[in-house]
Image: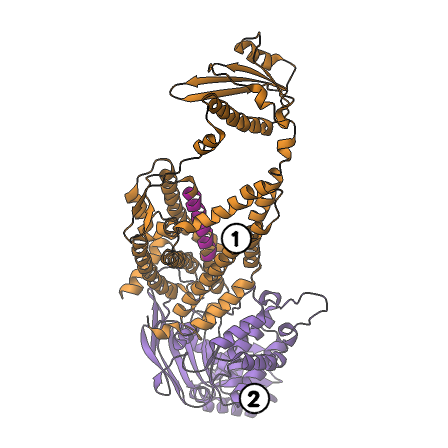
Chain colours: A orange, B purple
Amino acid sequence: MNKNDFKGFKQVFLFEFMTGVKKPAFLVTLAIICIMGLVTTPIMTIVGNLKDDGADDKKKSAIESVYVYDETGLSIDYEAFTASEKYSDVSFITDTSMTYDQAVESLSTGSDHKDIVMKTEYDTEKGFDVTILRSEKSGIKGSDLDKFEEDYSEFLRNEILKGLEVSDENYEYMSKEFNITVMKPSKDGSFAEDSETLSLDDYFKLLGGLLAVFLLINMSAGNVSSSIATEKSSRVIEFLLTGTRPVALLSGKIAARLLETFITVVSAYSSIFLSQVISLLLPSADTASASTGTSDNVIMVSSFWETITASRLIVALLYFLAGLALFTVIGALAGASVSKIDELQDALKFYSFLLLICLYTDFFLVMYKLYSGGLEGFKNFCALFPLTGAFLTPALLLTGNISTLLAFIALILLVIAAVVTFIFAAAVYESMLLYQGKRLKAKDIITLMKKQVVT
Amino acid sequence: MSFEVRHLQKKFGDKQAVEDLSFELKNPGVYALLGTNGAGKSTSIRMMLGILARDHGEVLFNGENFDTHKVNVGYLAEERGLYPKYPIMDQLLYFASLKGLSTDTAMERIKYWGKRLEVTEYLFPDRKKGKKFKPTLADQLSKGNQQKIQLMAALISDPEFLILDEPLSGLDPVNAELFKSVIHEEIDKQKYIIMSSHQMPVIEEFCEDITILTRGKAVVHGNLNEIKKSYGRVNLFVKCDEDISDTIKTLGIKVVNDTPAGIQLKVRDEAEAGHLLRQLTEANKTIVRFELREPSLHEIFIESVGKGADDDEPIETADAMEVVVGE
């Protein structure tokens, strides 16, 4: 392979790119991604604002009576709970002639559907245990019960602390949550979270990254394979070869797909970023709701950047593009192994199988890390092995689950794999350009690879 | 300028597709490659163009290795192809850019050839007011018009060297005449052209030098007039008012065809024809037509190729695959 082999690369690249971006499929996909990125957060914010506009707080609860069975021995002032407008019509019946079992029985047979039975127990090991029962035909909505559950928990804690004579100020202080993060230095010197298991936040980021990369790789490889199969099927390839080299044809197509994907990624992120800005500017129903609704979403994005540094971002981006190139080359091989476009689906079976095996391996790792932790060796293998790393390594790096050094080593391995695959693919692609006949099997392709590369 | 093919060879598996093909174009004009299906014409052309690796032999242009990326070559392939779902204008501009043409020059030439080949309406469809402009896609064209676009692609770079593989196959008589007139124009421009065809009258119309291939082997090659002369004037056509079959039988002349229009004979030499003429004159036969002529290209072709030529067979094993030259 020499410089001459790339004669015509620019022309092929420009043609492939221009025809690619004009395709309705690309435009529609890009539009959907951008629209989703742009509107999701503002819609979530608006819906959040609507939900948290305080109307629910003022609306009367659907619950009419609460049969209280308090086995804690504490003195709870239920009248205080009914002081709020929402629960002003709710009666707490503490002195009932019915036993707990009778009350439960009456719920299942009784005609009044707006009553609930509430039992509060205390266990020295487990703590407070509140059980709420409602009738099967209950007229009380789930959302009413959720709200009641939330308000009652707060009320109960308040009552307990009040019984212990804790002041409001101390209560506020004591009710704050503890967030403990253990950090350890990574090989590149930066500190990363030292955790055996994944946080739920990281899990969703990894899963999202995995799926996004999978979709982009699939799209790019599919486009290249169909483009090659079309050129072979329509026999236009013979004419093209008088003006350019096979390697230039292959590399021009791959480069065009990489640029298309890069544009898609940049557009998607820009849309999400813009949507965050829009969300910040959106008017809120009240100050309190604005601080919960809007800022929660912004926090989601800003927390994403906590573990991202410029070097990590660059390595992740390069890794993503190299992974995309690797799978696109494999897709190109599938396209080159057919003579007719109709045979392409069949030819892509092996490619799809390979893709899914790698994807599921990464899925397994992410899920295992969420529930059990450990598997550090397997995680490093998945990050370093080019076929599995292509989907996962950028997300692992950006979330701080692997060090920049490890990602850099993985990048070198991936680039080597992509270059070697490209050399093999180019040789096989050249051999099969004019081939017209039955679809080639993997065995035939390997024979050709040996013939072309070894000789 | 000269173009020389030396000892070209190609094997697909056990099948010898081309065996020791050599010829030379010293002067501008058309060189013909003839042969039945599967004779090795297209394989030879692909090897000349460097699309297909050759097992042996060399192709020289002005004494140097022939490289389509250095010499301005126009190629009309036997397997015609366009991107079916892409606008034809985009495709032509792409093909032109691969030949190193600027967009402006390419547009100029597309306009010229569009007019010349009567496809302007497809290249520059009307822009209807208020309606979205829809360019013409290749699969919206008839086969003949697609062939015109492909000829345009071959000629757009104004090539100094032209290779036309079966240029007139599948064309209706009107379009065939249009293509012929374009080829004549290219000949007048002193272009060097290699043409392959099954249509013997077309070859006779354009070519001075030919090679006839059968099963990859050149069985006849050289200047067409000299080849014809070498066969001698042995085709005799005789028409008399009276029955002359007895005379022919007596002289032992081979009857090729006996029709109401006359009798077609194959004589050993001109002397035998003269002997027959004398016999008929002495017998007072009324001779309506007595024509002694060289064999036609069609006859030479049939005689040299015979009837056992194979049809094209798809190559279906990895061993038999065609290998593209990458050097």
Image position of A133 (left or right of A213): right
Q: Amino acid at mark 1?
A: Ile
Mark count = 2
Front residue (pair B229, B63): B63
**Residue visible at 51% across and 48% down?**
A298
Verify whether residue A69 appears in magenta.
no
Indicate the secondary structure of the residue bearing disc 1: helix
Residue A272 shows which numbered tag? 1
Picture quadrant where residue B285 is located = bottom right
Query: Which percent across, then down, holds residue B152?
Result: 55, 77
Q: In the image, which residues are magenta?
A: A202-220
Mark 2 lies on residue:
B290
Vertically, is A69 above or below A345?
above
Does residue B36 show up?
no
Front residue (pair B49, B40): B49
Verify whether residue A208 appears in magenta.
yes
